[in-house]
Image (cartoon, helix red, strand yellow):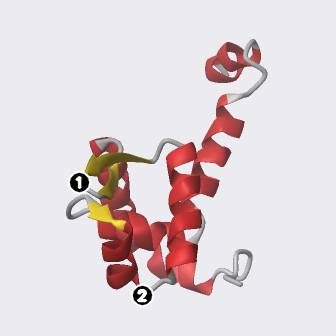
């Protein structure tokens, strides 16, 4: 409750901020990009190769991930390399994989959040 009160002054509750963060993770294409970036920073064409997504799709999702602060970019010659912005994001993704080892059966059976 203290978190909700603390965030009320900014107009956003902690719950709303968490929901917004998880919406950033909620797209399979964005998760595929983040998964590719877990190993090392990559340029767009390398992300396309790793994920098998189309280049315009990768670029659009990278823009979203950049805007949300989940990835960062660095110039490398004529390329821009994208990387996960914080090791805590990688840790969260690793924790999700461990959690799925426990709850995967229920997640797979859930009809509430079907992919489109």
Separation (CA) of disc 1 from disc 2: 24 Å
The residue under the point 38% across, 68% down is: 44
Residue 64 lies, in percent from the top left, at 59, 54
Image quadrant where one finds the C terminus: bottom right
What residue sits 46% from the left and 78% below the top?
A: 104
Residue at 65% across, 80% down: 110
Does residue 97 appear in the picture of this structure?
no
Q: Position of residue 1 (x, y in %)?
A: 67, 22
Task: Using residue 103 as the reference point, say whether residue 1 is left or right of it.
Answer: right
The mark lying in front, picked from 1 and 2, is 1
**Closer to the camera in the image, 86 or 51:** 51
Q: Which mark is residue 52?
A: 2
Q: Could one spot residue 50 in this view of the protein?
A: yes
Q: Residues within 10 Å of mark 1 (few under 14, many from 20)?
A: few
Instruction: Tell me the number on the disc at residue 77.
Output: 1
Look at 57% across and 44% down and name the residue there: 67
Q: Residue 74 location, x and y as percent?
A: 31, 46
The vertical placement of 87 against 81, above or below, is: above
The image shows residue 2, relative to residue 85, as above or below, that is above
- The disc label shown at residue 4, or none: none
Mark 1 and mark 2 lie on one chain; the one further toward the N terminus is 2
The picture places residue 81, in percent across and down from the top left corner, at 30, 56
Secondary element type, mark 2: loop
Above or below: residue 80 compared with residue 31: above
| The quarter of the displayed image where residue 102 is located | bottom left
View extreme (right): residue: 11
């Amino acid at each position: 409750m203290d978190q909700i009160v603390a965030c009320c002054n900014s107009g956003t509750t902690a719950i709303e901020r968490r929901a917004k963060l998880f919406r950033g993770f909620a797209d399979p294409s964005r998760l595929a990009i983040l998964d590719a970036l877990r190993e090392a920073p990559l340029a767009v064409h390398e992300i396309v190769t790793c994920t098998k997504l189309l280049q315009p799709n990768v670029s659009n999702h990278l823009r979203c991930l950049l805007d949300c602060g989940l990835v960062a970019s660095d110039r490398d010659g004529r390329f821009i390399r994208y990387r996960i912005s914080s090791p805590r994001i990688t840790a969260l993704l690793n924790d999700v994989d461990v959690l799925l080892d426990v709850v995967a059966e229920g997640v797979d059976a859930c009809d509430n959040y079907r992919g489109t």
